[in-house]
C-alpha cells in the first residue's frame, strides 16, 4: 500500500488542516489577550496624561494670576 488512495490523502489533508486551525485559534487567543492588555495600558496612559494636563493647566493659571497681581503692584 505504497500508493495512498484519494480517501487517505483527503483524510491526511483534513487532519493537517485541523491542526493548523487549532494553532491559529491559539495564536488568535494570544493576540486578543495582547490587544486587551495594550488597550488597558493605553487607557491608563490617557488617564494619566489627562491628569497631568490638568495639573499643568492649574499651574499655568496660578502663574498668570501671580503675574497679574505682581504687575498690578508695580502700577499702584
Image: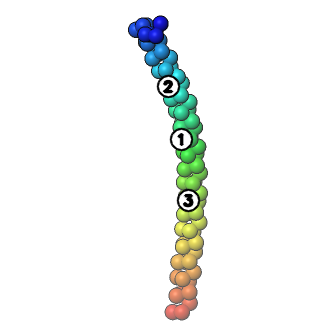
> What residue sits right under mark 1 in the picture?
35
| Residue that carries the numbered disc 2 in the rendered image | 20
Distance from disc 1 to disc 2, alpha carbons, whole Å, reads: 22 Å
Q: Mark 1 or mark 3: which comes first in sequence?
A: 1
User: In front here: 66 or 56?
Assistant: 56
Q: Residues within 10 Å of mark 2 (few under 14, many from 20)?
A: few
For the residue pair 19 and 50, the one nearer the viewer reads as 19
| 66 shown above or below 76 | above
Secondary structure of the residue carrying numbered label 3: helix
Percent across and percent down for residue 12 are 48, 15
Q: Secondary structure at mark 2?
A: helix
Could you tell which of marks 3 and 2 lies nearer the N-terminus? 2
On residue 49, the disc is 3
Say which residue appears at 59% left-offset and 59% top-offset: 51
Whole-percent x, y for residue 67 in the image: 54, 83
Give the residue furthest to the front: 2
Q: Earlier in the sequence, mark 1 or mark 2?
A: 2
Tag 1 secondary structure = helix
Query: Can see residue 25?
Result: no
Between the residue at mark 1 and the residue at mark 3, the CA separation in whole angstroms equals 21 Å
Considering depth in this image, is 54 or 22 the residue closer to the camera?
22
Say whether residue 37 is visible: yes
Amino acid at each position: 500500500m505504497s500508493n495512498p488512495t484519494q480517501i487517505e490523502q483527503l483524510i491526511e489533508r483534513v487532519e493537517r488542516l485541523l491542526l493548523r486551525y487549532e494553532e491559529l485559534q491559539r495564536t488568535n487567543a494570544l493576540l486578543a489577550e495582547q490587544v486587551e492588555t495594550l488597550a488597558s495600558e493605553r487607557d491608563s496612559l490617557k488617564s494619566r496624561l489627562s491628569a497631568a494636563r490638568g495639573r499643568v493647566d492649574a499651574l499655568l493659571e496660578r502663574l498668570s494670576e501671580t503675574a497679574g497681581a505682581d504687575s498690578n503692584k508695580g502700577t499702584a
